[in-house]
Image (spheres, rainbow, N blue to C red):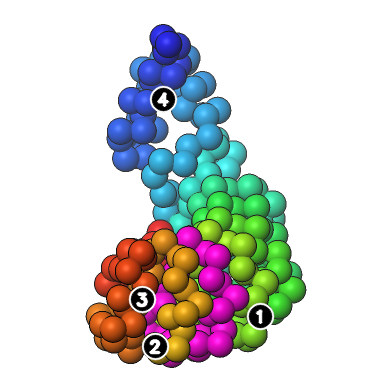
Amino acid sequence: MSLHIHDIFNLICKEFPIPVMVNLELISKCHETIIKNTEWYHSQLTIKNDDTMLYFIKQYNFRNFEIRNHIEKNHIDYLQNCHTLNLQFTKLSNKYIKKFHGCHTLNLGNSYTRLKRTTLMKLRHCHTLILFDVNFNNRDLEVLSKCNTICLTFSQVKNHHVKHLKKCHTLGLEGSFVTNKCVKHLKNCHTIYFGINSKIDRLHRDILRKCCFKASFNLIYI
């Protein structure tokens, strides 16, 4: 199947970091139109202030953001349609966090908001949830049973809580309180991150021999 010239240019753009890619719009008006109208997921755009956010919302169609400052409420309607959204260390009320349920990947690591059950019920529609060191009621994990990937690194989750996550593809449990007793619930998971200081001994890891083990959950840096 032959590729259209626009498709070829899109593939080329994805090979460059965002600052370089944006400069390619100087080639011609046609290239400028393609860059400004295409939805871009391939690289994360870091937003450090409100002026930068306004500029990229008005001029481009990026769908992968890292927000390093307070999010203005008038930007949330745009951000809720993102593919990937990194909100580490931000402070948003549950009212607004709920709006991001349409994101494929949502990183709430180290957020300053205690997540309510009603919020987690909305976020269950996300494919990947990063809840690194996030405050929530462990009993509410049951509503996330259909997520594909969940990072619970340094959470207070215990053995009887992870039973609700037995159908997840990938789990990050480093620094949590899970022990050997959780093994029976997780044998059908594809990948589990227990961390180098895990309380799961070798004997019980053998029970999970079908799973892939890794030391750290790199998705927390999404």
Marks 1/2: CA distance?
Answer: 22 Å
Q: Looking at the image, tell me whether mark 4 or mark 3 is earlier in sequence order.
A: 4
> How much space separates mark 3 and mark 2, taking CA atoms?
10 Å
Q: Is residue 141 above or below residue 59?
A: below
- Identify the element where label 4 is drawn: helix
Q: At 45% from the left edge and 16% from the top edge, which residue is drawn? A: 6
Give the CA separation, mark 4 to mark 3. 46 Å
Q: Which residue is mark 3?
A: 207
**Nearest to viewer (mark 3 / mark 2):** 3
Q: Which residues are magenta?
A: 157-178
Disc 4 to disc 1, C-alpha distance: 42 Å
Say what amino acid the circle numbered 3 marks.
Answer: Ile
Q: Residue at x 47, y 73 (%)?
A: 186
Q: CA distance from mark 2 to mark 4?
A: 48 Å
Could you tell which of marks 1 and 3 lies nearer the N-terminus?
A: 1
* Location of residue 124 by image quarter: bottom right
Q: Position of residue 47 (x, y in %)?
A: 46, 55
Which quadrant does the C terminus fall into?
Answer: bottom left
